Image (spheres, helix red, strand yellow):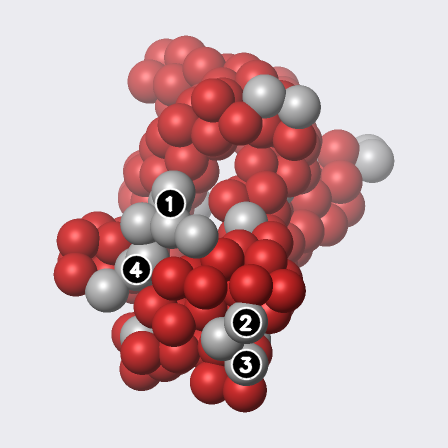
Amino acid sequence: MFCGVLIGVTYLIGVAFTFVFFATSHPAMDATPVEAAVGFRDAGTMVAVGTFLTVLPLPFALLFLGGLDSVLRRVGDGPLVPAAVSAGVLGFAIPAIGALVSAVTPAIGAADTSAAAGAVVKALDGVMPLSVALSGFPRAVLVIAVLVVLARAGLAGRFLTISGYAIAGLGILGTGTFIVQALFPLASLSALLFIGWVTALALTLRRRTAPGIV
């Protein structure tokens, strides 16, 4: 389950870079379409690095989910195990896809800095936060399914249980970003806490089960 720790490490690196990006190069959220097109054109390298760091946890996530599947099948069976793993794949993949879609903004800005092109740039830049919000649904399914299976086997500790259900609830509330953009902080916080929960889960399972499982 060591890959769960690597998910946390690589994710935190990406979060730190995102803060730097927004503080130094990302166009202001209230920028005009032309300003957005020019800003992303000039921030092409930062966007590329940020995209890479966003998708970097993905291979570790897939390995972690493979190990999690093995652990869950040892302690339980039924539909919750494949539901947890498939939800985990979606939970990690959706933001990665959102980042890849948003990564085309510098190319559009380099080709055209008109107001029309800038409007497209701003729209594509908004895909990433929406993908983070949308991933709250599969993240919640993963957390709840894992907790139910582990609880039946007596492996779900108090901390993992309470924090897990709270994070799942935050994630579901955060999906409301599609309707009310002011809810995005909940989606973002839930995504960050989810990574911490996954790391804690990996450490717990590694201690209580076979350490050889990734």
Picture disc at residue 114: 2
Q: Measure the C-alpha gap from mark 3 to mark 1.
A: 20 Å
Cβ atoms at labels 2 and 3 below 8 Å apart:
yes
Q: Nearer the viewer, mark 2 or mark 4?
A: 2
Q: Nearer the viewer, mark 1 or mark 2?
A: 2
Q: Measure the C-alpha gap from mark 1 to mark 2.
A: 18 Å
Q: Residue at x 54, y 81 (%)?
A: 112
Q: Residue at x 39, y 19 (%)?
A: 163
Q: Measure the C-alpha gap from mark 4 to mark 3.
A: 18 Å
Residue under pointer 4:
26
Mark 1 nearby-residue class (10 Å; few <14, some 14–19, many ≥20): few
Q: Is residue 59 above or below residue 33?
A: below
Q: Is residue 3 above or below residue 30?
A: below
Q: Amino acid at mark 4?
A: His
Q: Measure the C-alpha gap from mark 2 to mark 4.
A: 18 Å
Q: Nearer the viewer, mark 4 or mark 3?
A: 3
| N-terminal label among 1 and 2 | 1
Q: Amino acid at mark 3?
A: Asp
Q: Find residue 98 and report its horizontal and vertical position in percent.
A: 59, 59
Residue under pointer 3:
112
Say which element carries label 2: loop
| N-terminal label among 2 and 4 | 4
